[in-house]
Image (cartoon, rainbow, N blue to C red):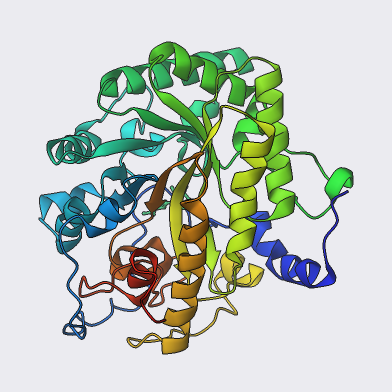
């Protein structure tokens, strides 16, 4: 049983229900999260520029060039429409993750159908702009079409292997890093050794009768493209319980000789997250598994505290902040990210740090779990550097 302080326990309990559905929520589905007919209209156009700070080309990626690559999520729509975020992504980052184009329900919505068009567009655009690509994700229960679960475990395995092989071969040489499995750790993180164990009771688990599907996915991935770096990625690894379960899975994989190269930490953080908790997750991997690397895969900082009720039913959610983010929240975000980046640069196993979107308006957190104006990213809606960005690139910047 892991030891936690009373304060941590309170905080964990407050978030428990949210975790039970997935912190990435009932709202997580692979298709873009956008308002539906019942949600209010989108917020008004971006405010005019307010800052005289100029983000020169390459400043963000160059600041960390000797430490890790800096990535962001981009969509095919942004590229097609030459969106401001696509330009900023090209100027400031050197890694791209297609935000949903590589998920199974997008690539192969029905058996035998492979639709690579949108993903190809993002990948080729990234390569044309001298960026590398993180492939996200070969297996994620939130984005798995139903047909994947049909049949006996060995039929499910064969189908999964065929899917992984087809997709990885298609992108071989273009995508060098893959999240092979996403969010497979148990969300039952409060019962310690009395709980259900490390493996998430997802439909993958239920349909195959256990967690061997994780092994199958990694084995197929290594065989399909032996040069690709293979990751297991999950959210809330900054939580000790969740991290312990995740470590148990990684340990089991390594003991069985399953090929895995690194752990991805999504780091969907809150304004009151202590950077030290996230850094501890990195150290946990480094200290136990020599040779494994760490990636931060989906960094953002939510301006809302979501109760479990809000995640589950969309009720009891904090009201919309509106078009003006509270200065104290912008400052808290800047302090958290400065502390986090100052820790990340000192950790040599951290090879890649990726934020989940470019400008605040790009973020899934404007629509999940409910539609509200959110401010989770490094650039504001006008495309300007927020205090958080300035804080991480310049230690002299006063928050
Ligand atoms: C989200 C995307 O941002 C949305 O556009 C999509 O509709 C749903 O997925 N954890 C993950 C990401 O691993 O794939 C999720 O991305 C956010 C939570």
Q: Indicate whether 372 appears above or below 223.
A: below
Image spot of residue 222 (x, y percent): 46, 16
Is residue 101 among the parts visible in the rendering?
Answer: yes
Residue depicted at x 39% and y 22%:
228
In the drawing, does residue 293 fall left or right of residue 152? left
Image spot of residue 330 (x, y percent): 42, 80
| Depth order, front residue of 345/196 | 345
Q: Indicate whether 226 appears above or below 306.
A: above
Residue depicted at x 52% and y 27%:
261
Residue depicted at x 27% and y 72%:
385
In the drawing, does residue 301 fall left or right of residue 310? left
Residue depicted at x 48% and y 21%:
160
Is residue 202 among the parts visible in the rendering?
Answer: no
| Depth order, front residue of 336/263 | 336
Image quarter of the C terminus: bottom left
Residue with the most extreme front position: 396
Image spot of residue 312 (x, y percent): 60, 64
Image spot of residue 66 (x, y percent): 35, 44
């Amino acid at each position: 049983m892991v030891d936690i302080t009373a304060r941590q326990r309170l905080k964990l309990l407050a978030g428990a229900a949210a975790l039970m559905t997935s912190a990435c929520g009932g709202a997580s589905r692979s298709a873009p999260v956008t308002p539906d007919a019942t949600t209010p209209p989108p917020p008004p156009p971006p405010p005019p520029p307010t800052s005289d700070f100029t983000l020169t080309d390459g400043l963000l990626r160059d600041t960390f060039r000797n430490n890790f690559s800096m990535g962001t999520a981009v969509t095919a729509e942004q590229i097609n429409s030459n969106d401001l975020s696509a330009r900023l992504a090209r100027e400031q980052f050197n890694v791209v993750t297609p935000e949903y184009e590589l998920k199974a329900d997008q690539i192969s919505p029905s058996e035998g159908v492979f639709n690579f068009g949108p993903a190809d567009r993002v990948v080729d655009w990234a390569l044309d702009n001298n960026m590398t690509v993180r492939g996200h994700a070969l297996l994620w229960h939130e984005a798995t079409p139903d047909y994947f679960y049909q049949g006996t475990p060995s039929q499910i395995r064969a189908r999964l292997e065929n899917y992984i092989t087809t997709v990885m071969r298609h992108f071989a040489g273009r995508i060098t890093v893959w999240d092979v499995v996403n969010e497979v750790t148990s969300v039952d993180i409060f019962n310690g050794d009395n709980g259900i164990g490390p493996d998430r009771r997802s439909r993958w688990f239920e349909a195959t009768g256990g967690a061997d599907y994780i092994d199958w996915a990694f084995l197929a991935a290594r065989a399909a493209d032996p040069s690709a770096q293979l990751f297991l990625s999950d959210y809330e690894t900054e939580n000790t319980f969740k991290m312990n379960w995740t470590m148990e899975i990684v340990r089991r994989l390594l003991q069985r000789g399953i090929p895995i190269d690194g752990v991805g930490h999504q780091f969907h953080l809150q304004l009151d997250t202590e950077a030290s908790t996230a850094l501890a997750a990195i150290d946990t991997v480094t200290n136990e598994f020599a040779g494994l690397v760490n990636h931060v895969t989906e960094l953002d900082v939510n301006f809302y505290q979501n109760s479990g009720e809000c995640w589950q039913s969309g009720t009891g959610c904090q009201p919309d902040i509106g078009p003006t983010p509270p200065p104290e929240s912008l400052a808290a975000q800047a302090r958290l990210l400065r502390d986090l980046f100052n820790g990340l640069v000192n950790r040599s196993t951290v090879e890649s740090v990726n934020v989940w979107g470019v400008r605040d308006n790009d973020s899934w957190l404007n629509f999940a779990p409910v539609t509200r104006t959110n401010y989770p990213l490094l650039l504001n809606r006008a495309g300007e550097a927020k205090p958080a960005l300035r804080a991480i690139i310049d230690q002299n910047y006063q928050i």
